[in-house]
Structure formats: structure tokens, C-alpha cells
Amino acid sequence: MPSNTRQRVAIVGAGPAGIYAADILSKTDLDVDIDLFERLPAPFGLVRYGVAPDHPRIKGIIVALYKVLQRGDIRLIGNVDFGTDVDLAELREYYDAVIFSTGAIKDADLPIPGIDLDGSYGAADFVSWYDGHPDVPRTWPLEAREIAVLGVGNVALDVARILAKHVEDLMPTEVPENVVDVLRASPVTDVHVFGRRGPAQVKFTPLELRELGHVPDVDIVVYPEDFDFDDGSEEAIRSSNQTKQVVKTLTDWTLRDPAELTASRRIHLHFLHRPAEILGTDGKVCGIRTERTELTGDGSVRGTGEFVEFDVQAVYRAVGYFGSPLAGLPFDEAAGVIPNDGGRVLDDHGRHIPGTYATGWIKRGPVGLIGHTKSDAGETIRHLVEDVTSGSVPTAPRRDPQAILDRLEADGVPYTTWQGWELLDAYERSLGEGQGRERIKVVPREHMTEISRQAHVRA
């Protein structure tokens, strides 16, 4: 296609990856119309539904994303599910190029005995629940006094903190009311976080870890016997200021006087413990068995054959997110990504599928921070622009911007718009007024859709 022809580009997924891609594309030399499709009625993806409510600093990213969509040059089409409401072949009828930025929202597997017992949960599902994701139930079975969290990344810290935190300390946040009710009744006293490697190999960020130590009436308990540093650990500490800060915080906690630990709830951090089996009675979780590990010299570990059991009544695995396959697209089942070369989607023979691209976690896997997502989008857009300029992007036959909306309306798909999101945003903020809260999220999908559709109906 000649580069002087106005392009039509669809982006599937309105989280940070999709919005960054749209923003970068809008600022290129291409003359382009951009439609941003989202499965949910509201945009912002994991920033809205994957960040703990007591981390408004991170949620501030939404402010930047909001400004991008508020400009009006990128059209949001929400409540449209790719694979159900539209498919790739159909999008190619309306758009010259399609970019997939659907992220990774499922929990990675942890194949150990007992993982399917009642009381064993994925952290991603729990995060979606306390963040008010409209696709998860409004209730959650918080009945355990002692809980295990498997993993040593920031998601594991978030899960442990929300489980242990007193609900009164969450009230200034945008935590949904149904979540407040369930957390208030939780009998939890102890949350145990397990990592198979040592303190120098954890994936916590320094700020997240330090914040954990300031949660009211929650003590952090560490165990000196879990602290070991091999040559690989020492090199990690020397080469990374972040690792150095994390190790210092953890080591400082070992120096606390046990008599000072008087809180009503505790978060225990266990290192050099590899989960071996979730124990059950009558089909329900009753404990966890771990194998003690030892460092091998390069920062990795091996099992020692020594096993330890802990009494817990619930287990949350926070061992990473995993991407989901998309209808009509190739998928790498091992990596959980769409096969691609710098964002150019590849078929089963390793050839670029013309006009088809990927960005974000569905492109590279669930690793990296927001900054990585932005640079990642830049790479994908650079290749799209190169392909348009070279004439290798095919021309869509139905180029009228209204055509896709007419098709959705004809099939009764209740799509939402940016104007509808602004209505929903204002409604959520009104719920928080007078309660000392910025907003209270609307949880049920039908409620979200009804409010955000009002702007479209009025138009």
C-alpha cells in the first residue's frame, strides 16, 4: 500500500501496551485512523485490574493513559470480545493492519501434587477479584487463618499484603465494597511467602518491599537460617543496586528483637524453600510441604532432600502470568506468546503474516515494567511503519470508519465508547464522595456497560 494513503489500524487490547502503541503510531508520519478495541467496557487493562488498590502511585499511570485517549484522535470501542464479537478475518475487512496487545491475564501453571485441591488458588484470579474485575465472582472464600503464597515477585507481595492488611487501612482506596465486606470477615493471622532461591534472587522491588514493613499491625517475620549468599548472590548484589537494597531490607529484618513482634497478623518470608506438595484432607488444603534447597554457587539452587511441612488452609500461587491463545492466530504454547519477530506476527513457517502485529506481554511474555512496555510498542510501530512504507501492508476493502460500528450494532453488540467511559469514571468517583475515597469501582459488567453505553445512546 502506498504510504501516502490514509491507513486504518485496529489495536486489540486497551491496556498500557495497546494505548502506548496507539499513541506512538498517532505521532508517526503516517496519516492514520486508529481504533482501539477492548474486551471489557472500561480501558486500561492490568493497570486498572492488576494493581493492588493501596498502590495509587502505580495507578497514577492511568492519568497518562487517560490523557492519550482524551485527545480524541484514537477511537475506543469497548465491550467487544475478539474471537466472539469479531475475528481476525473480519477485522482485516475493515483495517489495513491489526495489532494485538491482549496481555497475559492467566496464572502460569505450577505442576505439583495437590495444586487442584479446594483452597488452592491462582494469584491472578485473586488480584482480579480484589480489583473489581467484572468477569470474576463478587465473593471470595477467605476462611483460612494460615495461608501460603508461592512466589517472590511483586504480585506475591501484593497478595500477601492484601490478605494480611486490616480492611480499615484499605478504606481510603478504590477497593470495591464487596471486597471490603469479605476482607472484613477474614480470620487470617499468618501469611507465609515461599521462594525456592535465596534473598539475593527474589524479584521484589525495593520500594514494594519497604512498604511491606510499614503495614499497620502486621509484623514481617524472617528466619536467619533462610539467609545464604553464594558467589552468584554476591555478584548480583555488587552488580545491581536494586538487589543490594532488597537484601539490605531483608537482612535488617533479621536483626529485629522477637519481643518487638506483637502485631495481630504476620507475614512470614521463607527463602530456600521449594514447594513440593500441597497437602489435603477431604479434598481441601490443610498444609504445604516444601523441600529445603541450597545455593549451588551461581545463584541457582538444588534440593537437599530435607522436607518441611506448614499448616495452612489456603495456597495462592504467584509464579507468573501466562498469555492466552487468540482465535485464528498462531500461538506458542510453551512461552504463552504470539510468535513474532520484533512485533511482526509469524505463521507456523516463520513467515510474517502481512498486516498483523503484536506488542506487550502477548508479544514478549509477562516480564518487564511499564517502561519496557512503551519501548516494546515503539519497536512494533517502527516495523509497521516500515511495512507500510514498503507497500507490504494489504489494503482493507471496507474503509469507511462507520462500517465496523454499523456491523456491531446490526449484530446487537453493546459496544462502549470513550464518552461512555467518562460517564462511568464520573459515576465511580461520585460513589467515593463523602467517604474520603477517590472512587469506588463498579463491579458487575452489566452495570458498567449500562452506564458507559448511555453516552452512545444519547448520541
Image (cartoon, rainbow, N blue to C red):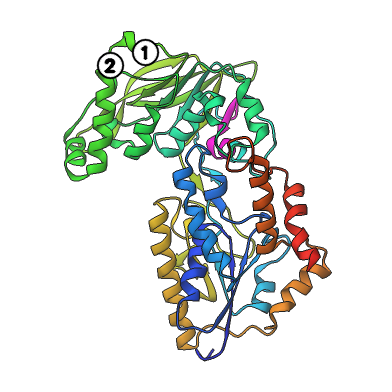
Q: Which residue is mark 1?
A: 261
User: Residue, x 49% and y 67% (percent of image)?
Assistant: 21
Query: Does residue 192 lie above or below 426 as drawn?
Result: above
Query: Does residue 416 lie above or below 191 as drawn?
Result: below
- Kind of residue indicated by mark 1: Leu
Residue 117 colored in magenta in the image: yes
Q: Residues within 10 Å of mark 1 (few under 14, many from 20)?
A: some
Q: Tell which of 203 and 117 is nearer to you.
A: 203
Query: Does residue 375 lie above or below 450 as drawn?
Result: below
Q: Is residue 351 visible?
A: no
User: Residue, x 56% and y 18% (percent of image)?
Assistant: 313
- Kind of residue indicated by mark 2: Arg
Measured as percent of width and height from the top left, residue 340 is found at: 46, 66
Q: Tell which of 250 and 67 is nearer to you.
A: 67
Q: Which mark is residue 256?
A: 2
Q: Quadrant of the C terminus?
A: bottom right
